[in-house]
Amino acid sequence: MFTKVNGKVASIDLTRSGPVIARRGAMLFYTGQVFFQPHQIPGMGGSMMGGLAGMAGRMMQGEHEATMVAQGNGTVHYGFRGLEVEVVEMPQGGELRVEASRLLAYTQGLQASIVSTAASGGGGGGGLMGALRSAASGVATGQGMFTTQLSGVGAAVILGHGGFITLQVAPNRPVTVDPQAFAAALGPVQTNLRSTVSLRNMGRTGGEAFQLDCTGQGVVYVQASEHRL
Amino acid sequence: MSELDTVWNPHTLPAGGDNVPGNQYSYCIDLIKPWFLSKGAMIAHYGQMTFTSLQQGLQGQLLHMVAQQFSAPLYLGDYVVAEGHGKLIIGDRGNDINAYDLEDNGNLTIRAANLLAFEPNLALQQSIVPGFVTLIGTGRFLASSNGPVMFVEPPVRVDPEALVGWADCPSPSHHYDQAWVTGFVAAAGRAFGVSSGEERQFDFTGSGTVLVQSSEKVLDDQHVVRSITGQLPGLSAGGLHQINAQIQQQLGQQQ
């Protein structure tokens, strides 16, 4: 549904795709009759309290970017701060986990929700102590405790600094990535943050103190840079 | 050997002016006659060249030429004249650089921050749209952009920040998309500063070409600032207060 115009711009024909939700300020230009309105503001569909509370919740978790909906007939071009774009198609349905700050646009067929990364095996072990430990390592690496999950049938565009590498993950072929280069995971992929720091080797770990183990079945998108968005 | 680790010399650098092969971020000008050059764009040069500020030090023939071709006092401090003979390599903070040829006495309006260099066959004039300049004549100019430039034909609406320039079509008008402000609650949201962020666009109609860069990252907004401050002295106290309030509100939103 999305088409890459060049490495940094994706376009979409709203007539065929239906409404598109995109990061605010990312629209470059459009042709045809297209209308933009803020997404999820109080009073715009849904119950008012639910919208407000939901927004506050997402803001608290740091998983919130202002978005807007484009609808109508026409072609819209999106790009953001000169970052590389990658189109992720999910024609058969599926789930895509991506940080809100790396999500450029998605079609309305996809449902966005906030999920806890700790729930998918944060690596800290079970119980309260485990949750605390994953929170601490989340802070240390800049990988938040929460992430945005898109599920359903549709397509999305993700953002990365320096271009993307897509890595296949299979049950017998796990892959380990740098948490700061990790961009998104498509399909049932469990991410497990692992610390290589211990009291014995403190300060001499070779600079890769945290690693993200990806296991399961799917695709992992990695950007060719350690620049966090 | 790949082009990226080629060691260049004056004979292997492209003749007649072109991007340095394999590198869209730099451009080599074959300097024979004077060029206008954005200040600080020069990376390196071979041969004898002098760079003269437009504000001082110009003499004789050159002063006459500048007076003829450069009628944009707001931008006088941003350009220099390069004259001499040799190869001149220019770059602009890692942005893509492209050369365009303006034909048949054409006209093209471009964001001043994106205009890197132009031949003196082209006349430069200040555009009515703040921060933009118009080139008129026949000749070559170089423009930088964040990501590749896309060419679009009107009718089209463009994000003001993504716009690089336009050729042969009438100046754009503003288009405000506020159709969503219908209900009472939405209007309240609008009053509290909830906005789609895309409601202001430049609307192009007629025939011509619109140039759009690949991101909404403005290279430099110094020129807009300058044109605003240039208009401040004539304002009344009430008007100044109003602008001040607006600035405070916008600064508050950005934090």
Image (spheres, helix red, strand yellow):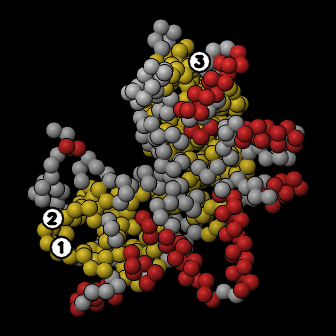
Residue that mark 1 sits on: B49
Q: What residue type is labelled 2?
A: Tyr
Separation (CA) of disc 1 from disc 2: 8 Å
Residue furthest left in the image: B11
**Label 1 element class:** strand
**Label 2 element class:** strand
Both marks 1 and 2 on one chain: yes
Crowd rating for badge 1 (residues with CA inside 10 Å; few <14, some 14–19, many 20+): some
In this rendering, the answer to whether B126 lies above or below B222 is below
* B59, B182: nearer the viewer: B59
Crowd rating for badge 2 (residues with CA inside 10 Å; few <14, some 14–19, many 20+): some
Quadrant where the image shows the C terminus of chain B: bottom right
Instruction: Kindly identify which chain the residue marked by label 3 belongs to.
Output: A
Left or right of A94? Residue A166 is left
Left or right of A55? Residue A81 is left
Residue that mark 3 sits on: A123
Instruction: Kindly identify which chain the residue marked by label 1 belongs to.
Output: B
In this rendering, the answer to whether B39 lies above or below A171 is below
Kindly identify the residue that appears in the image at 81 percent across and 55 percent down: B189
Residue that mark 2 sits on: B46
